[in-house]
Amino acid sequence: MTADTLPICLTCGTQYAAPRPDCPICEDERQYVPPTGQAWTDLATLRAGEHRAVLREQGPGLIGIGCEPRFAIGQRALLVRAKSGNVLWDCAAYLDDEIVERVRALGGITGIAISHPHYYTTMVDWAHTFDVPIHLHENDSQWIGRPDPAVRLWSGTTNRLADDLTLVNLGVHFAGGTVLHWRDGADGAGTLLSGDIVQVIPDRNFVGFMYSYPNLIPERPSVVRRAAELLSEYRFETIHGAWWDSEVPRDGQEVVQRSAKRYLEHIRD
């Protein structure tokens, strides 16, 4: 079995090191196995089918990477073009020659950082292709479907990838749930790259915090309170979530704090 024929869950996009009957990610209460049952694909099949690469700007210095039609959960990754070097934030399952060529033309990447296990996907293929490490929080190590030496586990609350890039473990959604603070993002005003640890919602004056999004399980108040406290120490004007064009365009810091306050008030009531 070659890397491009390793099994990928059709529902969540997680790639595993060998064939198996189940997907632990989907059997967890934060995700789901569809009524039709567990089903699988692989990168070779995706590349040979109707999927095509999509790369487009998502903000100053941010290039979204994904595919059409959407696959699995449907998130797009972000190429963060920081002064310290390009970093791939989160990961999309689809990877083909066009993506590789275009990312290399933009300067390649120095590393990969992922918010939580739902976006681990084909991270090892990305790491091998670009010969870079993957930075994951150790609290989520049990969810790694394809162990590999490229994976570097970190612990604690923060991990500085560079002077301008800091990973912050908020613990929302997953124990290792992490966001990336880009100090120089948004033309110097600061950007928070949040995946769905801090969820960008239709009302851009607020954000959301959930333990499970598809199953509508709210996050614990103590976790949301801690997340707001941690983020109060960082300056950021914009927030970029996990989906195409999911952006809080202004007052990001204030949006997080007012959202946490509203959330805690509703949970208390």
Image (cartoon, grey):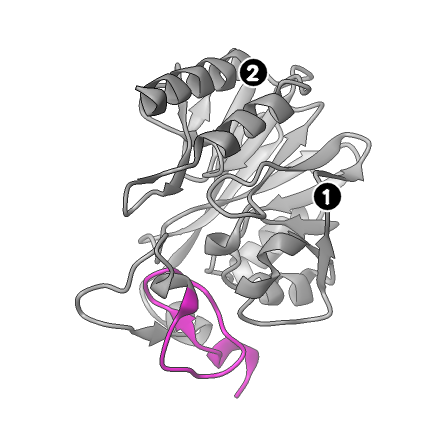
Q: In the image, what residue occupies the spot 31% across and 63% down?
A: 50
Q: Which type of secondary structure does the marked residue at label 1 adopt?
A: loop
Q: Is residue 85 left or right of residue 28?
A: right
Q: Give the secondary structure at mark 2.
A: helix
Q: Position of residue 180 (x, y in %)?
A: 63, 35
State whether residue 106 appears in this view.
no
Residue 198 in the image: above or below residue 53: above
Q: Which residue is tagged 2?
A: 253
Whether residue 21 is visible to the viewer of this picture, yes or no, is yes
Relative depth, front residue between 42 and 97: 42
The image quarter containing residue 253 is top right
Q: Position of residue 145 (x, y in %)?
A: 53, 70
Q: Residues within 10 Å of mark 1 (few under 14, many from 20)?
A: few
182 is within the stretch colored magenta? no
> In the image, what residue type sits under mark 2?
Gln
Q: Position of residue 236 (x, y in %)?
A: 61, 18
Mark 1, mark 2: which one is toward the viewer?
1
Residue sitting farthest toward the left: 35
For the record, the magenta segment spans: 1-24
269 over 156 or under it: above or below: above
Quadrant of the image occupied by residue 46? bottom left
Residue type at tag 1: Gly
Question: In the picture shown, does residue 263 fall above or below 168?
Answer: above
Q: Which residue is mark 1?
A: 156
Distance (Cα) linking label 1 and label 2: 22 Å
The reply to whether the C-beta atoms of the residues labelled 1 and 2 are less than 8 Å apart is no
- Residue sitting at 50 percent across and 74 percent down? 16
Residue 8 within the segment the image draws in magenta: yes
Q: Is residue 196 left or right of residue 87?
A: left
Q: Residue at x 72, y 65 (%)?
A: 150
